[in-house]
Amino acid sequence: MTQIKQPQTDAYSLILEAIDVGVYKPGDRLVESDLAERFGVSRTPIREALQRLETQSLLERDGRSLIVASLNHNQMAELYVVRRELEGLAARLAAQHATAEEIAVLRAMVSADDALVNDPAALARANRRFHKQIHLASHNRYLVQQLDLVHRTMALMATTSLAARGRGQIAQSEHDGIVSAIEARNEAQAEAALKEHISVAFMTRLKQDADARERSD
């Protein structure tokens, strides 16, 4: 196995990033020795990171092994309810507190990401950056912490709603509307636009799951 040396990053962040980008997917078994070799760190910090991830319910036990957790239908629905409310609050606060420079960065992200609508994996990464920028623009550290936890849990979904046909272009249009509301300092509209964006993403994912079940029957 090729060793990936990342001396400046802790084991927890390395494993979390690997789950986030899909190197390890729901159901995959994580082995201390393999992780230590991959990331070029000793087994002790790997063991501590795995324990932390298990405590956060990002990993679960399968006998004596630890595997990447997966979300059932109810868990996914619960997660989207929380995400919708917290993301909406972040947009409302961003409309209040975002600096001109932060808004300019959001606008630039939307423009740049238009080129990714036919690349779901790249667009999903860009989407995470965009939402994180809104979180930071809220200027509320406690909200950012809670949203970080929500987005870490989102990584337990094996697919992205942006892979659905036409969803990338629609999502970009929604992002444009969110930024426009923040630019206009329209708090209510920013909150409503982001909540609607999350609702549409949830409906898209539900349709993806329904299609997947139909194919497997």
Image (cartoon, rainbow, N blue to C red):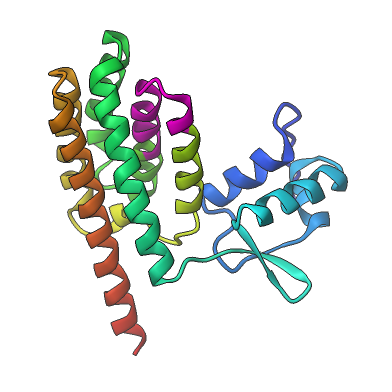
Image x and y of residue 150, in percent:
45, 46
In the picture shown, does residue 184 fall above or below 196? Answer: above
Image x and y of residue 175, in percent:
21, 35
In the picture, measured across the screen, residue 124 lies left or right of residue 177, that is right
Q: Is residue 129 magenta?
A: yes
In the picture shown, does residue 120 fall above or below 131? Answer: below
Residue at 51% from the left image edge and 47% from the top image edge: 152
* Most common secondary structure along the magenta stretch: helix
Task: Please state the extent of the stretch shown in magenta in the rendering.
Answer: 128-144
Q: Depth check: give the residue in front, 107 or 178.
A: 178
Residue at 35% from the left image edge and 21% from the top image edge: 137
Image x and y of residue 134, in percent:
33, 28
In the picture shown, does residue 11 fall above or below 78? Answer: above
Image x and y of residue 100, in percent:
26, 9
Q: Depth check: give the residue in front, 211 or 153.
A: 153
Residue at 51% from the left image edge and 44% from the top image edge: 149
Residue at 74% from the left image edge and 42% from the top image edge: 39
How many numbered marks, from 0 up? 0
In the picture, measured across the screen, residue 137 lies left or right of residue 176, that is right
In the picture, measured across the screen, residue 196 lies left or right of residue 112, that is left
Examine the image and state in which quarter residue 16 appears.
top right
* Quadrant in which the C terminus is drawn: bottom left
In the picture shown, does residue 206 fall above or below 105? Answer: below
